[in-house]
Amino acid sequence: MVRARILKTPEIEKPPATLTAEQSWQIIAAARTARDRLLLGVLLDGGLRIGEALGLRREDMHLLPDTTHLGCTHRGSHLHVRPRQDNANGARAKSGRSRVVPLAQKSVHRYRDHLAEREMVPRAAGSDYVFVNLVGPHAGRPVTYSNAKQIIERIGSRCGFRARPHMMRHTAATGWIRNGVDPDVVQVLLGHASSASTAVYLHATDEDLRAAVELTAAGGTR
């Protein structure tokens, strides 16, 4: 006989903070540069971690319907999250695994707008990073986590609500679940190694609980 503790998955007492659909629209509309609109869009629509987004290189962005000429077998517009250890801005892909994230057409347009914006920054020409500083002494260098955090917080403040980088990922994941996307698909999109990590987004809202009770009450009425 061997005594051992039973391993239990931690219970989620409070769901992660997210933005409403209206707040998501507001924060992108309040961004003052194409770069910031693209960054917010990638986080909100693709569910990327902020470190994954800041580590993106232009070679990771596959925006054509067919990219077989690039040696890529994935169809449709998408981006590649690739873990790299040599990012100049210290960005890290937490999972340590590569994955593909589809891109909506609006993200494709935002990326093209950002490329046009970058052309106005001479020192950005030699950088392969997607997100670079546009002004100041560090113009052309890749955006750091602290820079991105400040950018998102400032835009949220202009909108009148609290915004943090991780809230964008939580918003994307919760939105997928609420719209009926299979949890297994959400797990792959988020790059989670375990379904337990995705389970945090399976929380029930007050509206869910009330709807369930009212549905049962209506069915039980004779």
Image (spheres, helix red, strand yellow):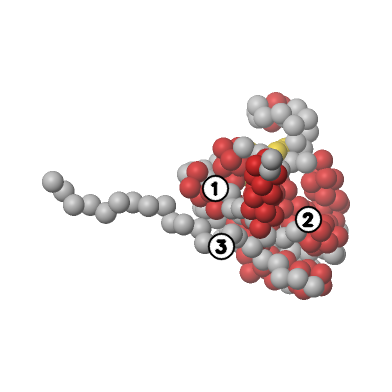
**In the orientation shown, which residue stands out farthest toward the front?**
222
Q: Which mark is residue 21?
A: 2
**In the orientation shown, which residue stands out farthest toward the left?**
1
| 22 is higher (above) or lower (below) than 59 | below
Residue position for label 1: 198
Marks 1 and 2 sit apart, C-alpha to C-alpha, by 21 Å
Do residues under tags 1 and 3 come within 8 Å of each other at their CB atoms?
A: no
| 98 is higher (above) or lower (below) than 161 | above
Q: Position of residue 99 (x, y in %)?
A: 58, 40
Please, what secondary structure does the residue beneath circle 1 have?
Answer: helix
Q: Position of residue 102 (x, y in %)?
A: 70, 38
Marks 1 and 3 sit apart, C-alpha to C-alpha, by 14 Å
- The residue at 52%/53% (across/down) is 94
Q: State left or right for residue 77 relative to residue 212.
A: right
Residue position for label 3: 14
Marks 2 and 3 sit apart, C-alpha to C-alpha, by 20 Å
- The residue at 80%/73% (across/down) is 160
Quarter of image, res 27: bottom right
Image quarter in which the C terminus is found: top right
